[in-house]
Image (cartoon, helix red, strand yellow):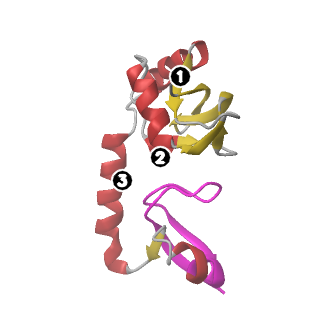
Amino acid sequence: MTTKLILTHDVSNLGTTGEVIEVKDGYARNYLVPRGLATPWTKGAQKQIDQMAEARRKRSIASLEQAQTGRAWLQENVVTVTATAGANGRLFGAVTTADLAEAVKAAGGPAIDRRKIEVVPPIKSTGRHSASVRLHEDVVAPLEVNVVAAR
């Protein structure tokens, strides 16, 4: 059996906010709906879908050219993040996507939505790390991060 849902957040390998999807009942009941990633589809939900699509359009980088300019900046630059670390270089906590978005903005780069940054595995030590940023539907940029310990 399948269930029709409306995604309320972007879900990797499934879809973007506002899309109507069909998934197996268990996946919907046990994962997507309890975590607030999706809501059940109804005939009256079209208005909600339109509102989410409009909000996404306002948030996203408008054109492909802007996204390619942002990708060029991200490829040329290494972003430095300062975090509290122990003596062996292990961080107290992890570097969040919000920290990365803030660091890119502070370094003079493009404004990036933290929800578009993917960090796998989480950054939990000092040194060089990499992440990826989805600037546009067709543009994914690499993000090089240098984590230094706060003095």
Residue 130 point in image, percent of width and height = 66, 31
Reading the chain from its start, which is encountered first: label 3 or label 2?
A: 3
Dot label at residue 15: none
> 106 and 30: which one is in front?
106
On whether residue 6 falls in the magenta region, the answer is yes
Q: Which residue is mark 1?
A: 80
Residue 129 point in image, percent of width and height = 67, 30
Query: Going 62% across and 84% down the picture, which residue do you hit?
Result: 25
Residue 132 point in image, percent of width and height = 61, 35
Query: Going 57% across and 45% down the picture, which residue do you hit?
Result: 92
Q: Which residue is mark 2?
A: 115
Q: Which residue is mark 3?
A: 53
- Marks 1 and 2: CB-CB under 8 Å? no
Which amino acid, mark 3? Ala
- Marks 1 and 3: CB-CB under 8 Å? no
> 22 and 111: which one is in front?
111
Q: What's the magenta region?
A: 1-28
Which amino acid, mark 1? Thr
